[in-house]
Image (cartoon, rainbow, N blue to C red):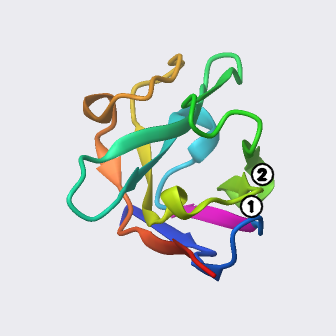
Amino acid sequence: QLQLVESGGGLVQPGGSLRLSCAASGFTLHYYAIGWFRQAPGKEREGVSCTSSSDGTAYYADSVKGRFTISRDNAKNTVYLQMNNLKPEDTAVYYCAVDRRLSRICALLRNEYDYWGQGTQVTVSS
């Protein structure tokens, strides 16, 4: 059974850090491009970061560049999103997603991904 499970969300003060995890079962993540997206209340789901399967290239939304880092642990079949210097505008439900086409350059576009996790809530507030 294919499954993506996000974890690591929570409540953090502005300037704080969180590390989100996206653990997969039923398929091997290192073959595929992986994306992190987020959706705030009343807003569209937006791409935050992604990592390519073909060459490991990563991309970031302008709003998170220099603060967020995406990484993979192939041994654990898990992708991480390290989030530093968090801001209130980072508050959202964060989702990981998989593009199950092989050897892809990733993109921060929702329709490039065909399998999604259930999301984890991140709240940045004092």
Depth order, front residue of 96/62: 62
Q: Which residue shows up at 57% across the image and 28% down it?
A: 62
Viewer-side residue, 49 vs 56: 49
From the viewer's perspective, tell me whether residue 112 is left or right of residue 23.
left
Q: Amino acid at mark 1?
A: Lys
Task: Answer with the quarter of the image where residue 125 lies.
Answer: bottom right
Residue position for label 2: 73
Q: Main secondary structure of the magenta part?
A: strand
Foreground residue, 27 or 67? 67
Image height check: is 45 above or below 58? Answer: below
Query: Mark 2 touching mark 1, by CB under 8 A?
Result: yes
| Mark 1 surroundings: few (<14), some (14-19) or many (≥20) residues within 10 A | few
Q: Secondary structure at mark 1?
A: helix
Q: Quadrant of the C terminus?
A: bottom right
In the rendered view of the protein, which quadrant contains the N terminus?
bottom left
| Outermost left residue | 42
The answer to whether residue 100 is magenta is: no
Mark identifier at residue 76: 1
Q: Say if the magenta span includes residue 23.
A: yes
Which mark identifies residue 2?
none
Q: Quadrant of residue 64?
A: top right
Q: Which residues are magenta?
A: 18-24
In this image, 69 relative to 1: left or right? right
Cα distance in 3D space between marks 2 and 1: 5 Å
Q: How far from the left and from the top, in percent, is residue 15? A: 76, 64
**Does residue 53 sit above or below 46 in this rendering?**
above
Q: Name the amino acid, label 2.
A: Asp
User: Residue drawn 25% across and 31% down?
Assistant: 111
What secondary structure is marked by label 2?
strand
